[in-house]
Amino acid sequence: MNENMNKAAEVEINTGSEEAKKDYAEHFMPAVHRIGRGTMGISLVLVFLPVLYFVLIKGYRAPLSSYISVLVGISSIGMGMWLTEPLAYWPVLGSAGTYIGYLSGNVGAMRFPVAVNLQSTMKADINTPRGQVVTIVGIVSSVFANLILLLIFVLGGEWLISVLPEVVMASFAFVMVGLLSSMMVMRFSGNKEGFVKGFLEAFPYLALAIILKFVIGKIAVLAAWGMAITVASCILLGYIFYKRDSKKDAENAAK
């Protein structure tokens, strides 16, 4: 009996009560999108303030063709990233985390690892009210930590870099590798059936991404769309697996 009660409590913690799920769908998520769109709109306006300052107050001018050239250049470089990064991060960050992450920056280096670690530690799925709240609190905390560290490094960073040994400075080249590795390990470890099972489930996606990385790298015309093609291919592979598993579940249920 105690075991059944514990299992019921665990389900309640991870999925939430019916009232919580109803409030989550009818009030929480609409508010998230309303506030998120508003803050993103405000930030879109604010990013143009430096340009307005230089043009209207300082009197600096540039030909219209220069602005158009810069816009086209940046768009051609960032178009794939703009389309694929939100798709790649949203399943872990959720809607609120995505808004906060892209407003504050450091999505891949800071917000995403924090969300993965919290959800794995707390065993909270992002699709549940509990998972959303846990992720939001963690990401907001990381934003404040970022601001404090940024302030410290802005004020004393030059002095700190000057006293760091050369071997420490050289190790910074491995930061991204370390972050990616830690995220992969956390994702594998979060599997309920163990680390090995988690790795085997993720292996097809890893193999596909690695293969596409080498293939696309050898085709110049596809190089700019490497990330977009890789993410889209992994999403397609996931959909194929989903349809396969759904069919198996339906067949087992029929038996």
Image (tube, grey):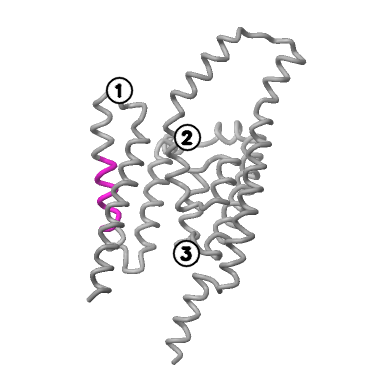
Q: Residue at x 56, y 67 (%)?
A: 21
SS of the residue under disc 3: helix
Which range is magenta? 200-210
Q: Nearer the viewer, residue 22 or 134?
A: 22
Of labels 1 and 3, earlier in sequence is: 3
**Image spot of residue 58 (x, y percent):** 75, 13
SS of the residue under disc 1: helix
- Identified by mark 3, the residue type is Thr
Q: Which mark is residue 121?
A: 3
Of labels 2 and 3, earlier in sequence is: 2
- Identified by mark 2, the residue type is Trp
Which image quarter is the C terminus in?
A: bottom left
Q: Nearer the viewer, residue 241 or 212?
A: 241
**Label 2: which residue?**
82
**Image spot of residue 150 (x, y percent):** 62, 39
Q: Which mark is residue 221?
A: 1
Q: Residue at x 48, y 24 (%)?
A: 75
